[in-house]
Image (spheres, grey):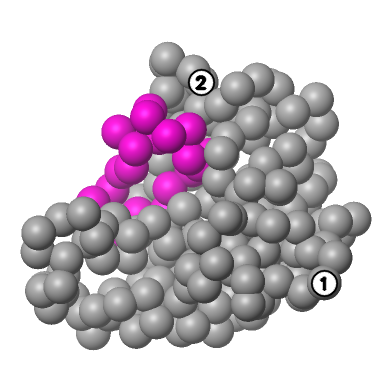
Amino acid sequence: MTPRYPGAFWRPDDGNRGGDGDLGRLPDVGTLHEAVSPNPTSVFGWVQSAKACHAYNGRRGYMEQYADFDRHVEGVADGNEHCITFESYDGLKPESEPSYHEVQTDDPAIYGTSANTGRWDPGQCERAADFIAWCEVVLGSIKAVEIPDSRPGQSGWAPHRWGIAPWRVPGGEVWTRHDGKPCPGDLRVNQIPGIVARAQQ
């Protein structure tokens, strides 16, 4: 069992503890996602059914942790055995909801009306930076740096889309079976250098 991040509420999935067993190693990569969820604080129900992530960075940096970081979750396909899956609130509605195509009303100036028009809010950025710093200092297995792609053998942080076509480079791990998924969107990807720089501080 790895240490639990003290800035998150511990909310384990009691049915499967967030995955299918221990990885047998510490993670060496952290992947940053957006959850396509209208829930500003939690994706606990989704995690119970889908074993989808280790933690969720909610609105204004409210964070929940669902699984220990050495547990297997189903968040990044070929990277599941060595990656942390760090989901985040984006204010968007799943396509399955009848109101999916309606304009967002939850502060669209920040969260946008699509994956590519939204940003992480300031609290989410600060929470992500703190978590990235904690992973380097406490877990000791993920460096507080960006990595440029999903090729194995690196240590650091990357947007989920680095493992998704068309952004995945030759030799990179496949991090989803859904090609073209902009996770996270363009503006959030552009925030990552600043988040990592803050973590290094």
Disc nearest the viewer among 1 and 2: 1
The magenta-colored residue range is 39-60
Whether residue 199 is visible to the viewer of this picture, yes or no, is no
Counting residues from the N terminus, which is met first, the one under dot 1 or under dot 2?
Answer: 2
Looking at the image, which residue is at 64% across and 31% down? 72
Q: Percent x, y for residue 18?
A: 51, 27
Q: Percent x, y for residue 190?
A: 55, 84
83 relative position to 130: left or right: right
Res. 120 image quadrant: bottom left
Figure label count: 2
Q: Is residue 118 above or below residue 73?
A: below
Res. 160 image quadrant: bottom right
Q: Amino acid at mark 2?
A: Arg
Looking at the image, which residue is at 13% across and 78% down? 103
Q: Percent x, y for residue 126?
A: 48, 65
Q: Is residue 46 above or below residue 37?
A: above
Residue 17 bears which disc, if any? 2
Secondary structure of the residue carrying tag 1 is: loop
4 relative position to 47: left or right: right
Q: Percent x, y for residue 94?
A: 25, 57
Res. 98 image quadrant: bottom left
Quadrant where the C terminus sits is: bottom right
Marks 1 and 2 sit apart, C-alpha to C-alpha, by 34 Å
Looking at the image, which residue is at 37% across and 29% down? 49
Secondary structure of the residue carrying tag 2 is: loop
Q: Residue furthest right?
A: 153
Magenta residue check for 44: yes
CA neighbours of label 2 inside 10 A, class few (<14), some (14 to 19), many (20+): many
Residue picked out by circle 1: 170
